[in-house]
Amino acid sequence: MKNNVLRNKNFLLLWMGNSVSVLGNRFYNIAIMWYIIETTGSSIALGLSVLCFTIPSILVMPFVGVLADRNIKKYLLVISDMINGCIMLAIALFMFFGELPIYLLYLLMIASSLVSAFFSPAIGATIPLIVGKENLAKANSFMQVTNQLSNIIGPALAGILIAVTNMWLLFLINGISFIISAFSEMFLAIPKVDIDHIKRRFYLQFKEGFTYVLRYKKLLHLIIVGGIIINFFLAPLNVFITVLCNQILKVGASGMGIVDAAISVGALSGSLIILLNIMKDRIKMVIFGLSIEGIALLISGVFPESYIALLIFAYILGIGVSMASVGIGTLYQTMVPENKMGRVGSLLSTLSTFIVPFGTMFGSFIINYLSISWILNVSGILVTLAGLSLIITFRKNRGHAADNLSV
């Protein structure tokens, strides 16, 4: 195995193809939200679009993970990217020749969600095989940096393109990016693995993880706060930001793209703070991260008609999300024994993702009856209190994250 991942042909093919695809996806995310709000003017329609893209993945993800452990990873990557490319090109064609009905757009989003559910576990299982454990951290870093840059450049560029060109062009670009990614993946040589040991059913592993979490209050509290409560309140933010930019601030798609990019710049800043090791205590990092997420929501709630305040909110939110995510991930890895990490991780991932549709629909519904300022203020207070509540749970035996969790 080559020590320099950039000299690893398989990694380069995967990295470059994925980078193009991620940038195209950022175009898609902005374009889809803007098209729906412009076409319908409805926050509920926005919420339904999020459901169409999340629920199908949630339902099939536990089962496709089993396929990703088989020796068909290359086929999963190529076929899923190719189908997603065709879906995006279909959306572009419908828009080019006339208006795309919302119901048809929802159906195409559901199809894309189902296909994407196969891609994520496949690429996650492929990277360790093609770079080896000794290069895994470096390979993941390259992927993460590229994704962060795409998250910064993509939304801003997408907003500008929507303002100066036709909407269909963004879906065309995304479709082409998927096909480029699929083409590069065709040349991958992925080592085969022994799959004889992969016999156990998902529900048994899930049950073991659930039983383990229930036994330890600190871990349970961390999952409830970091995985469920926070995700519930942050889930509808895409809807809120779209409504703010379109109906209140009237800054257009380019303005919304810049807000989205500001979140990513904040996340990059948060990553830099973590790398500089300014805050070594991971419990403090989580509490700080969650608290400033709440403060960011309060800023946007107090000044809902200020675009500058929205940009400040987005930047601070990005810092908070980055620090909280890394801190929670590190605590989880510290508190859970290696032989149970997969099962507990599966539970955490399922619960965190499962709550998103409920938060999205709740936010999309309530915004029709309450002012967005009131919603953001209340959300900010509750998120801050949820973060601070971890102080009570973790103040005992600080410094011993595992807290005798091994069994």
Image (cartoon, helix red, strand yellow):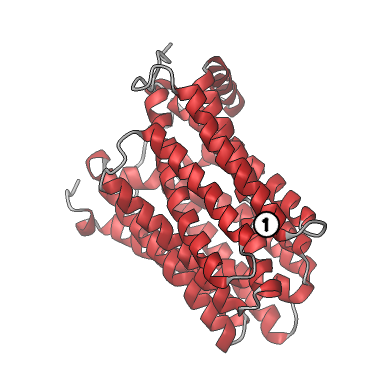
Q: Position of residue 261 (x, y in %)?
A: 47, 67
Residue 202, by quadrant, is top right
Above or below 252: residue 384: above
> What residue is shown with label 1?
50
The residue sitting at the left extreme is 3
- Dot 1: few (<14), some (14–19), or many (≥20) neighbours within 10 Å? many
Q: Look at the image and tell me whether residue 40 can be seen.
A: yes
In this view of the protein, which residue sits in the foreground, 365 or 344? Answer: 365
Q: Name the image quarter holding the C terminus.
A: top left
Q: Position of residue 123 (x, y in %)?
A: 43, 50
Q: Is residue 62 in sight in this rendering? A: no
Image quadrant holding the N terminus, namely: top left
- From the top left corner, tell me how far across and down residue 99 is, in percent: 75, 81
Q: As drawn, is 59 to the left or to the right of 3? A: right
Q: Nearer the viewer, residue 125 or 358?
A: 358
Residue name at image x 44 percent, y 38 percent: 286
Residue that extends furthest to the right in the rendered view of this protein? 369
Give the side of residue 73 with respect to residue 52, left or right. left
